[in-house]
Image (cartoon, rainbow, N blue to C red):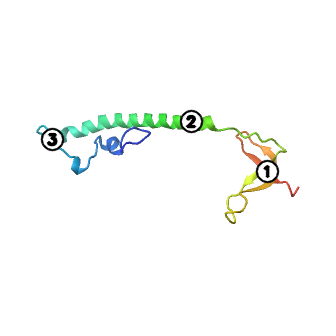
Amino acid sequence: MKNNSTGLSPAHMLYDQNIALPSAWSTPHKSLDVNESMANRPTFLNTRLTDLRRLGYRKNIKSKQNSSNRYNAKVTPNQSKIGDRVLRHKDVQNSKFSSTWEGPFTVTKVDNKGAFTIIDSSRG
């Protein structure tokens, strides 16, 4: 089965072989010289597999970049400013009917990457 990001199966990247079930096997069309095949296999693997792995690596990087671009196109930055009142999402709920948000909290500090520091509005 092919990997979505590389377009190659793991067996193809590791061994340059397409693995098939025994029910799909067919007889070889020509006679094979086993000794010659075994002698040529290491050099073939060293040259062909490095090319395949480089190709898979490049395709994987391109796929990650496409995923990143797709994600970043949908993200909207948070517009909270110092002094704004916000709600915070509860990580753990007491029951399935309890509120999923708690607060209000007041924003006291805004970092450059969108994170902000809050304090409890009811305490001070």
Q: Say whether residue 9 is left or right of residue 97.
A: left
Q: Where does label 2 land, which residue?
A: 70
Mark 3, secondary structure of its residue: loop
Q: Sequence-wise, which precedes: disc 1 or disc 2?
A: 2
Q: In terms of depth relative to the viewer, which is nearer, 68 or 101?
A: 101
The x, y position of residue 16, in whole percent, is 29, 40
Q: Where does label 1 land, which residue?
A: 118
Query: Label 3 vs label 1: CA separation?
Result: 71 Å
**How many labels, in total?**
3
Q: Where does label 3 land, which residue?
A: 28
Q: Sequence-wise, which precedes: disc 3 or disc 1?
A: 3
Q: In terms of depth relative to the viewer, which is nearer, 114 or 71?
A: 71
Type of residue at label 3?
A: Pro
Type of residue at label 1?
A: Ile
Q: Residue at x 51, y 38 (%)?
A: 64
Query: Label 2 vs label 3: CA separation?
Result: 46 Å
Q: Residue at x 52, y 34 (%)?
A: 66
Q: Say whether residue 35 is left or right of residue 97.
A: left
Mark 1, secondary structure of its residue: strand
Image marks 2 and 3: residues in contact by CB distance under 8 Å: no
Q: Residue at x 32, y 45 (%)?
A: 11
